[in-house]
Image (cartoon, rainbow, N blue to C red):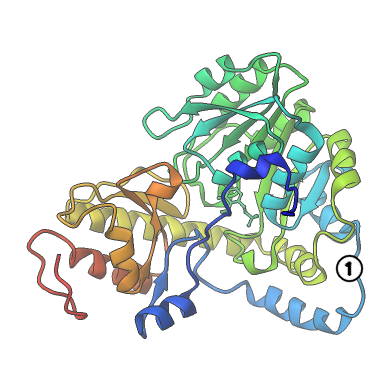
Amino acid sequence: MPLRFIPALADMVAYAPGLPIELVKRRYGLEDVVKLASNEYPLPPFPEVRDAVIAAIDRLQRYPDGYSTDLREALAAHFGCSPDQVTVGCGTCELLFLLGSVLLEKGDEVVLAEPSFTTYQDVIDLHEATAVAIPLADFTHDLEAMAAAVTPRTKIVFVCNPNNPTGTYVPVAGIARLIERVPDDVLVVVDEAYNEFVTAPDSEDVLALQQAHDNVIILRTFSKIYGLCGLRVGYGLCAPELKAAIDKVRQPFNVNLLGQVAAVEALKHQDQVAQRREANAELRAYMVDRLAACGRATVPSQANFMLVDMRDLCHPHDQVCGTLLSMGAIVRDGHALGCPGWARVSVGTQDEIDFFLRKLASLEVGAPADSEGRTS
Ligand SMILES: Cc1ncc(COP(=O)(O)O)c(C=O)c1O
């Protein structure tokens, strides 16, 4: 007799992350491989974080603090709120699933943009809720249409800002208008995983919106600009009632000891965060310029990645990312992200970007064979 899995699983597919560098090296017999597929920060964590993590290793025989007290207090002090308004998770991804667990039942509706971060759909599917997907307008959230799509059955509205996979940003004033239109018993999730990369001038503060509205949660992560995705720490700023609900369903020690230690230390170094923001913005602009110079369009991004238009390459565009992979440039095929014909490419180091650009150039019309002997 087969196991009787929950019906929701029937239509779900397992998340397929970008391939690890070592595996690509082995598979294609390559020495040089760059990974620009997972929107990671390309440099190691801050030196102070490294020291703090190493110092904590001798405490690994104990469970971590199940309340993540130091981390929640540090985040509360940083954002000027109470620790009761801070919930932490094994990455923001865990918090997304926990939000689904405390809010969603079969038949509930969830409003989200399409395309947006794929995990939202997994959370919806797991609970047999119904996605009300509002197409992006010019690659950007259509917040008016999203607000209009809310019905008495809506439980959650997801706003991803900057949006993954497009990198586009909506000013906070637009999110404020959406929140005003959404009933108090509908949770607005503002997923700001890439917030620290934003350089667009914005006069309003999304955190103030959370303080004014109990039905808003702001999600952020240590995975991106802090360079700590290997330790899996994300957090949410929300009403104490929502944090308390999440506490009932999360596993007891959901943030590991090294993650807690690293995040507390990382938060102290906002000067380095600012430097990384600037460095990312410069390299982002460099990438856009270089791609434009060879006729490749990009979607204006406020994040550490961008969509690159591959549709007019002479190479079949549904094979571009596979071919780049075989040359050692790991990028994300937009097909899997709802953007067929585009590739989502992370902002790497200067060397990594140049490597990618060289491989891409070898696929352009009339390009000479590259060093691996391939032609377009
Ligand atoms: C929009 C968005 N939200 C959340 C996450 C999850 O981040 P993590 O679970 O590493 O905190 C990601 C990761 O890529 C993301 O792109």
Residue 136, position in %: x, y? 43, 30
Which residue is pictured at 60% across the width and 19% down the height? 177
For residue 244, what is the image quadrant? Answer: top right
Crowding at dot 1, Cα within 10 Å, few <14 / some 14-19 / many 20+, comes out as: some
Residue 144, position in %: x, y? 52, 18
Number of numbered labels in the structure image: 1
Amino acid at the residue labelled 1 = Pro
Compared with 67, 139 (above or below) is: above
SS for dot 1: loop
Hey, which residue is sitting farthest front in the picture? 1
Compared with 118, 68 (above or below) is: below
Residue 314, position in %: x, y? 14, 55
For residue 160, what is the image quadrant? Answer: top right
Q: Viewed as shown, does residue 172 lie left or right of 320?
A: right
Residue 366, position in %: x, y? 7, 63
Quarter holding the C terminus is bottom left
Check disc 1 and report the residue beneath it. 64
Q: Is residue 83 visible?
A: no
Q: Is residue 5 visible?
A: yes
Q: Nearer the viewer, residue 6 or 59?
A: 6
Q: Viewed as shown, does residue 206 lie left or right of 84?
A: left
Quarter holding the N terminus is bottom right
Which residue is pictured at 79% across the width and 69% down the height? 261
Compared with 54, 114 (above or below) is: above
Q: Viewed as shown, does residue 284 lie left or right of 254?
A: left
Which residue is pictured at 38% across the width and 43% down the height? 339
| Distance from mark 1 CB to nearest ligand 1 atom below 8 Å | no
